[in-house]
Image (spheres, helix red, strand yellow):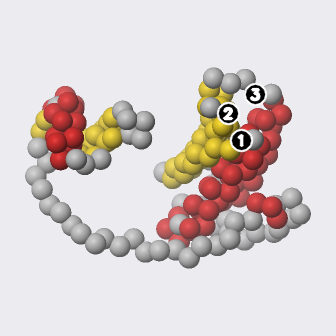
Amino acid sequence: MKFVFTDKKVTLPSKVHAYAEKKVGKLDRYFKSDAEATVVFSVEKGRNNVELTVRSGGTIIRVAESTSDMFATIDASVASVERQIRKNKARLAKRLRQDAFTRSVDADEVSSFVPEVEEDEFKIVRTKKFPIKPMTVEEAILQMNLLGHSFFAFKNTDADGAFSVVYQRNDGGYGLIEDEG
């Protein structure tokens, strides 16, 4: 597994990076050899934040954790990734390593045990059909706000009619998702 560490507005000692590499490296057993882990460390209002993103093939798993201790935050983020993998293991089975869930437990790993959670089926409870209209990003944001929705799909006239989605971010800003094709 390849690692990319980023420190945002904080300077951390190398032992924190080494600890993160050791803990996140244990997730390697779930992924094929092309896996890459991006770990972003930050401190805001006395809270230690870790954003952990693991990419392997077409699968991306992202978690964000925050505690008062950086080491505990690293542990919590690794546990969250394991929880996501276990929760969705049937859906992820083709994308993960074949022996990802055969596990030998040693004394160091007992503390990171994540209980297995029964998987819920994806259940579509409503289907809507509507024409996707061509408009600019600004028009799409306006339309989304007028409807009171948190996202809005449209054909982006600024990008030659490519399918796009604007969405309301938790920080109050807006995001744009565009089709590459």
Quarter occupied by residue 124: bottom left
Residue depicted at x 75% and y 65%: 113
Residue 76 visible to the viewer: yes
Q: Is residue 121 above or below residue 139?
A: below
Which of the marked residues, 2 or 3, is nearer the chain's N terminus? 3
Residue closer to the observer: 136 or 26: 136
Residue 131: percent from left, percent from top: 10, 52
- Residue 10 vs 19, above or below: the answer is above
Labelled disc at residue 68: 1
Report the quarter where the C terminus lies.
Answer: top left
Which residue is identified by label 3? 12
Count neighbours of disc 1 (C-alpha within 10 A) and say few if under 14, some if 14 to 19, many if 20 or more. Answer: few
User: Which residue is label 2 attached to?
Assistant: 46
Which one is in front in this view, the residue at disc 2 or the one at disc 3? 2
Measured in 3D between alpha carbons, the distance from the residue under mark 2 to the one under mark 1, in whole angstroms, is: 7 Å
Please, is residue 137 above or below residue 88 in the view? above
Name the spot of residue 23 as percent of width and height, x first. 76, 49
- 35 relative position to 59: left or right: right
- What SS does tag 3 mark? loop
On the picture, is 153 further left or further right than 16?
left
In primary-sequence order, the first of circles 3 and 1 is 3
Closer to the observer: label 3 or label 1? 1
Do the CB atoms of the residues marked 2 and 1 lie less than 8 Å apart? yes
**What amino acid does circle 3 point to?**
Leu
Amino acid bearing label 1: Ser
Residue kind at label 2, given as amino acid type: Gly
The mark total stands at 3
